[in-house]
């Protein structure tokens, strides 16, 4: 390989290392936010919590729909 090719490869490696470091920093920040906001230490815990929250949302939506239906029937809307 020529000297310029080696220098280019070295630069690409340094750029890749920088990108990895930035991504690790972002990952750390996001995991901290996940822990602080939702009390989850891992992605798996967050996924489980998201499923539980979705189920709760669906249950509440059903209650709202039933309440609206009762009001419509009661007041003939």
Image (tube, rainbow, N blue to C red):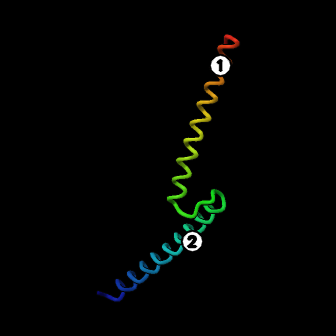
Which residue lies most toward the left here? 1
Which residue lies most toward the bottom here? 3
Residue 3, picture quadrant: bottom left
Separation (CA) of disc 2 from disc 1: 52 Å
Q: Is residue 47 above or below residue 41?
A: above
Q: Position of residue 11 (x, y in %)?
A: 44, 81
Q: Which residue: 59% across, 41% down?
A: 56
Left or right? Give the position of 29 relative to 19. Answer: right
Q: Quadrant of the C terminus?
A: top right
Q: Is residue 41 above or below residue 19?
A: above
Crowding at dot 2, Cα within 10 Å, few <14 / some 14-19 / many 20+, comes out as: few
Q: Which mark is residue 25?
A: 2
Q: Secondary structure at mark 1?
A: helix
Q: Mark 1 highlights which residue?
A: 70
The foreground one among 16 and 32 is 32
The foreground one among 14 and 28 is 28
Q: Secondary structure at mark 2?
A: helix
Q: Which residue: 29% across, 87% down?
A: 1
Closer to the chain start, of discs 2 and 1, is 2
Left or right? Give the position of 12 relative to 51. Answer: left
Q: Are marks 2 and 1 in contact (CB under 8 Å)?
A: no
Q: Is residue 12 above or below residue 54?
A: below
Left or right? Give the position of 29 relative to 43. Answer: right
Q: Number of labelled discs?
A: 2
Residue 32, picture quadrant: bottom right
Q: Position of residue 41 (x, y in %)?
A: 57, 64
Q: Position of residue 4 (x, y in %)?
A: 36, 85
Q: Position of residue 71 (x, y in %)?
A: 68, 18
The foreground one among 12 and 20 is 20
């Amino acid at each position: 390989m020529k000297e310029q090719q080696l220098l280019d490869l070295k630069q690409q490696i340094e750029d890749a290392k920088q990108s990895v470091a930035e991504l690790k920093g972002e990952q750390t920040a996001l995991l901290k936010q996940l822990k602080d906001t939702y009390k989850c230490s891992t992605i798996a815990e967050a996924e489980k919590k998201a499923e539980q929250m979705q189920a709760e949302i669906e249950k509440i939506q059903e209650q709202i729909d039933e309440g609206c239906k009762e009001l419509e029937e009661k007041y003939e809307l």
